[in-house]
Structure formats: C-alpha cells, structure tokens
Amino acid sequence: MLELNLSVSEAARQLGVSRQTLHSIISGRSAVTAEMALRFGRFCGNGPGLWLRMQQAFDLWQAEKALEGEIDKIPTHKVAAE
C-alpha cells in the first residue's frame, strides 16, 4: 500500500473489507479469494484474473516445496493412441 500512499486501514476501507482481512492477505496468512480478486482488480484497475493467477502460482510454488522429492517418485502414464 506504500506505493499508493495509502495506509492498510484506508485501503481496506476503500476495498470494503476489514483491516484485519487485508493485513492477513498482505502478510501471506490468507489467500486471495475470487471475491478479493474482484475487489483488488477494480481497486488497481487490472482486473481479477491477474490476482487469481498470482494466487495460483503462489499455491503451486508452496505445494512444490512441500512435496519436494515425492512428486519425482510418481510414475507418468501416457494414454495409448488409437
């Protein structure tokens, strides 16, 4: 919010959410939901898709870290061509 010269409280007010909700997302303790993506997309003028894609990329990154080594043990199967 520093780049916009807004406090978290003021940004939360403009977004229509609580300060705690916004702080939780900013700190990485809560995910960006579809509803928040709509709010952020309007607030920043870049649409909700960007926010959902960033959340998805973050979720995949976390999952890859958590499953490091396990995924390599899963065999890959290919569907036979007819």
Image: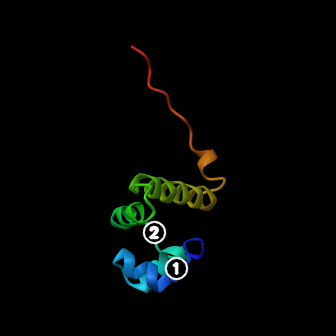
Name the residue type under label 2. Answer: Ala
Position of residue 61 measured from the top left corner of the image (x, y, whole percent): 59, 57
Quadrant for residue 19, please give it.
bottom left
For the residue labelled by badge 1, is the local secondary structure a helix, a strand or a loop? loop
Mark 1 vs mark 2, foreground winner is 1
Question: Quick check: 47 left or right of 72?
Answer: left
- As drawn, 35 above or below 49: below
Residue carrying label 1:
6
What's the residue at 59%, 71% (across, down)? 3
Asked if residue 78 is positioned above or below residue 43 in the image, the reply reads above
Q: Amino acid at mark 1?
A: Leu
The residue positioned 48% from the left and 74% from the top of the image is 25
| x and y percentages locating residue 30 in the rendered image | 47, 74
The reply, left or right, for residue 68 in relation to residue 54 is right
Looking at this view, is 54 or 61 the one in front? Answer: 54
Relative vertical location of residue 7 with respect to residue 44 in this rendering, above or below: below
Between 65 and 75, which is closer to the camera in this rendering?
Answer: 65
> Does residue 49 appear left or right of residue 75 in this picture?
left
Few, some or many residues within 10 Å of mark 2 (<14, 14–19, 20+): some
Q: Give the residue number, with chain letter if any, for mark 2.
A: 31
Q: Secondary structure at mark 2?
A: loop
Give the mark nearer the N terminus: 1 vs 2.
Answer: 1
> In the rendering, at what x and y percent does residue 77 appear?
50, 32
For the point 43% across and 58% down, the residue is: 45
Q: Residue furthest front?
A: 5
The answer to which of 81 and 52 lies nearer the viewer is 52
